[in-house]
Image (cartoon, helix red, strand yellow):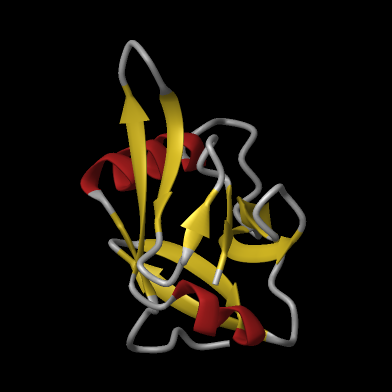
Amino acid sequence: MEAVQTSPISLSQGAIVEVKRLMSAADFDAAQFLRIGVKGGGCAGMTYVLGFDAQEADDELFELEGIPVLVKKAHGIYLIGMEVDFEDGLNARGFVFKNPNASSTCGCGTSFSV
């Protein structure tokens, strides 16, 4: 499947560096893509999905700074304008989701409602 031109999401420079670091690991499966999505659950109603996965028929494929990114077609509406960042500070380390569509989020920042 060919990459779609305009991605509903973006990756910060920190997230790009971290994802590329993970992809450069010796045991990384090159047949996998970065999947970003949502699923039901969490204290606010929906949680984010972020990981490496195989492409499926209902996926849209985007390329962000040389990183192939999969998003389920049905998830795009929840992710429009979202930025994935990576924090590497003393208080927190990990990926952070900045979603302008979220009407509320939980205290840990991993679940949201729209």
Total tally of numbered discs in the picture: 0
Task: Say above or below: 36 vs 4.
Answer: above
Judged left or right of residue 12, residue 78 is right
Position of residue 93 measured from the top left corner of the image (x, y, whole percent): 42, 23
Position of residue 19 measured from the top left corner of the image (x, y, whole percent): 43, 43
Residue furthest top in the image: 90
Judged left or right of residue 38, residue 19 is left
Q: Residue at x 56, y 71 (%)?
A: 70
Residue furthest left in the image: 13
Judged left or right of residue 93, residue 13 is left
- Front one among 99 and 25: 99
* Quadrant in the picture for residue 110: top right
Position of residue 60 measured from the top left corner of the image (x, y, whole percent): 56, 83
Q: Residue at x 72, y 64 (%)?
A: 39
Judged left or right of residue 101, residue 6 is left
Position of residue 43 measured from the top left corner of the image (x, y, whole percent): 70, 47
- Front one among 112 and 73: 112
Residue furthest front in the image: 104
Task: Say above or below: 44 vs 54.
Answer: above
- In which quadrant will I find the N terminus? bottom right
Task: Say above or below: 88 vs 102.
Answer: above
Task: Say above or below: 9 vs 1.
Answer: above
Q: Residue at x 69, y 72 (%)?
A: 55
* Quadrant in the picture for residue 44: bottom right
- Front one among 44 and 8: 44
Q: Residue at x 46, y 66 (%)?
A: 103
- In which quadrant will I find the C terminus? bottom right
